[in-house]
């Protein structure tokens, strides 16, 4: 179980996160939602141990995260980050096997290779295992990184999986596939926290949704509890209507078109000619 | 490491040993390869009945052998520290010169050449030939220390700051070296120039044994950082998430590289481009896995510097060309090739 208490994080005098408390139980998929700059990624990086909180505590399986040694922590949690800048020509397989680094000393065991093969297959990258990572498309690269992160935890169902926008570069099929993999793993005990921008995906796949606003926890509940037009407007300033999907009984959000008048924000534009004619009539 | 990479390493090892043995015979005074083998076998007591010319044996053991061994050690040290520094900086175009190690070493050496008669008389009598080497070594270590301290942010070394500090130190050391050169006498200038261009000509069993520990320690230790450097190429944060102790890795890789480069510069002057050319060639041959690249760069570095030294003493024999000139002539086109390729 992951327990976060009174977590605050400051960077150069700016408070990015304020008194955030939350819990994630074994077998749960929690989606983290919020506007840009709400503190989602910072929260993920604090949970992963990459950043040190200004105050508050993070406890994974009843042990403070900073008390873990590097190796044990790396076997207990993995994080898929948003950015991956690789400068050398590694092959896909070489990158995925790095996920097993916390598990072997000098060379990977047969079991490590088996896990690498399985994660490459489930992420749909096994066919180009020997290709150079840099030659792949953005979506393919994202799936390779996911395979690496999954192989880090594959054989530890007590582990915590952190996914920071895992589907941002993926096509429709892989968006669903990646989230379904995360969800199916959670059914075997994995804890999953995932940052998403697609609210309908969050509604479909998350057991619980946590919404952040200006560095504070704003809402925490099941999709049916928290997803309504008012909350969505408060967080994103976007109008929407909600219907309940007959099959899944989950809320489905339909967004209303947002109108913008160019001359209100671009002073060099005149009102559009079509519009002017209509107005004349 | 895959099978192909293991095979390449074995081939490189054999090629390196053969190059060394053949190069023992080559120089202003040629020794036939057969005689080299007989002399070597004789030395280790393998062929008591075969005898070799006294003169061959003298040249071989007193002059050639320390030189070839020094070339191999320096080449191996420059090759592996080049690869390691590229791993830490996550940049295939970096080399130990980039963080100012070589510039610091050469500045201190030039200072000693310029002021030896004025300031260092006592030290000079005590240390003799070693004064210059000692100065270069101190210069390398001091620069690395200063750059490392400047780059610390919240107690951890920051790679970008380290690079920028290295550029600043390089500029400063370059300016001061230039000033010393400008003020030097004719005789000093010759020494400075010869030393700045690099040479293995000063190799003796004595100075070989003096630098041996400083080069062997990094050569033995750096290959163990292969896994950590692979993880580093995902980014420092990713490496930490994979359980790599990133501060430990940065500290020791920079320290071992400084030791290796400092000791090399101390005995052989500045030999450029090995640290850049060799790891790149090793990657072209068999891939980018650091477990392979580090060992491969050590072997190929030793081989290439041995070859470059053969060229330096045979191209216009009996005159010797500075070895730094040869490595730079070979290295520059490769550097430009990488740049153009990366750009496309």
Image: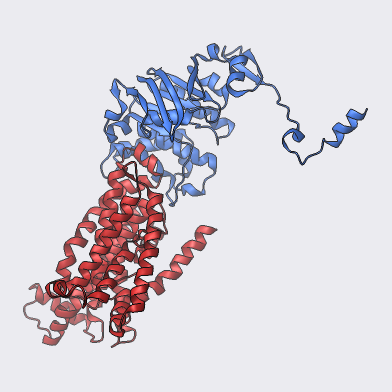
Chain colours: A blue, B red
Answer whether residue B225 is visible to the viewer in this image.
Answer: yes
Q: Where residue B285 sits: x, y (%)?
A: 39, 60
Depicted B105 relative to depicted B27: above or below: above
Identify which residue is drawn at 41% across, 50% down.
B160
Q: Where residue B61 sits: x, y (%)?
A: 14, 78
Residue toward you, B236 or B316: B236
Residue toward you, B113 or A164: B113
Which image quadrant: the N terminus of chain A?
top left
Q: Where residue B238 sits: x, y (%)?
A: 39, 40
Q: Where residue B334 sits: x, y (%)?
A: 44, 67
Answer whether residue B1 is visible to the viewer in this image.
Answer: no
- Residue farthest toward the right in the current orientation of the protein: A281
Residue toward you, B106 or A192: B106
Q: Quadrant of residue B323?
A: bottom left
Q: Is residue B17 left or right of residue B323?
A: left
Residue toward you, B67 or A240: A240
Q: Is residue A255 left or right of residue B104?
A: right
Depicted B258 relative to depicted A223: above or below: below
Q: Say how many tags the image has.
A: 0
Identify which residue is drawn at 57% across, 11% down.
A249
């Amino acid at each position: 179980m992951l327990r976060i208490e009174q977590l605050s994080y400051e960077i150069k005098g700016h408070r990015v996160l304020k008194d955030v408390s939350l819990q994630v139980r074994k077998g749960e998929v929690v989606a983290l939602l919020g506007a840009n700059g709400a503190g989602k990624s910072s929260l993920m990086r604090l949970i992963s141990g990459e950043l040190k909180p200004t105050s508050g505590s993070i406890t994974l399986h009843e042990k403070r995260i900073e008390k873990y040694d590097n190796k044990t922590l790396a076997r207990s949690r993995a994080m898929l980050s948003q950015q991956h800048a690789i400068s050398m020509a590694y092959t896909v397989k070489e990158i995925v096997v790095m996920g097993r680094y916390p598990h072997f000393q000098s060379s990977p065991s047969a079991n490590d290779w088996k896990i690498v093969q399985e994660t490459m297959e489930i992420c749909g990258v096994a066919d180009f295992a020997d290709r150079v990572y840099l030659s792949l498309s953005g979506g393919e690269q994202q799936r390779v990184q996911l395979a690496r992160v999954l192989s880090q935890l594959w054989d530890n169902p007590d582990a915590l999986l952190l996914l920071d926008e895992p589907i941002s570069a993926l096509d429709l099929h892989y968006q669903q596939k990646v989230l379904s993999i995360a969800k199916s793993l959670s059914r075997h005990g994995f804890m999953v926290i995932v940052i998403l921008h697609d609210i309908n995906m969050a509604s479909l796949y998350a057991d619980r949704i946590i919404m952040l606003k200006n560095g504070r926890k704003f809402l925490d509940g099941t999709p049916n509890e928290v997803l309504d037009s008012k909350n969505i407007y408060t967080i994103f300033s976007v109008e929407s209507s909600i219907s309940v999907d007959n099959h899944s009984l989950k809320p489905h959000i339909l967004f209303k078109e947002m109108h913008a008048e160019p001359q209100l924000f671009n002073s060099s534009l005149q009102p559009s000619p079509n519009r002017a004619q209509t107005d004349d009539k | 490491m895959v099978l192909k990479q293991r095979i390449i390493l074995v081939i490189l090892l054999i090629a390196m040993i053969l190059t060394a043995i053949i190069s023992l015979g080559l120089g202003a005074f040629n020794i036939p390869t057969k005689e080299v083998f007989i002399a070597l076998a004789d030395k280790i007591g393998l062929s008591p009945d075969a005898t070799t010319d006294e003169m061959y044996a003298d040249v071989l053991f007193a002059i050639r052998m320390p030189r070839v061994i020094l070339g191999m050690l320096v080449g191996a040290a420059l090759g592996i520290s080049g690869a390691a520094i590229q791993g830490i900086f996550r940049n295939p175009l970096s080399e130990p010169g980039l963080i100012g190690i070589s510039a610091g070493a050469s500045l201190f050496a030039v200072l000693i050449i310029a002021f030896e008669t004025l300031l260092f008389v006592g030290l000079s009598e005590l240390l003799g030939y070693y004064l210059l080497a000692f100065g270069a070594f101190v210069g390398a270590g001091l620069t690395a220390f200063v750059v490392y301290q400047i780059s610390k942010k919240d107690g951890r070394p920051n790679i970008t700051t380290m690079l920028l500090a290295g550029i600043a130190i390089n500029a400063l050391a370059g300016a001061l070296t230039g000033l010393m050169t400008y003020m030097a006498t004719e005789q000093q200038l010759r020494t400075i120039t010869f030393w700045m261009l690099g040479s293995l000509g000063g190799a003796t069993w004595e100075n070989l044994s003096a630098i041996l520990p400083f080069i062997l320690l990094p050569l033995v230790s750096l290959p163990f950082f292969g896994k950590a450097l692979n993880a580093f190429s995902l980014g420092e944060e990713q490496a930490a998430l994979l359980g790599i102790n990133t501060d430990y890795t940065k500290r020791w890789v920079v320290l071992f590289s400084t030791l290796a480069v400092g000791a090399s510069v101390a005995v052989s002057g500045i030999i450029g481009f090995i640290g850049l050319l060799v790891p790149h060639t090793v990657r072209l041959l068999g891939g980018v896995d650091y477990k392979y690249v580090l060992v491969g760069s050590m072997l190929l570095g030793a081989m290439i510097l041995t070859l470059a030294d053969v060229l330096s003493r045979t191209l216009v024999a009996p005159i010797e060309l500075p070895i730094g000139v040869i490595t730079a002539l070979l290295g520059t086109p490769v550097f430009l090739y990488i740049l153009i390729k990366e750009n496309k």
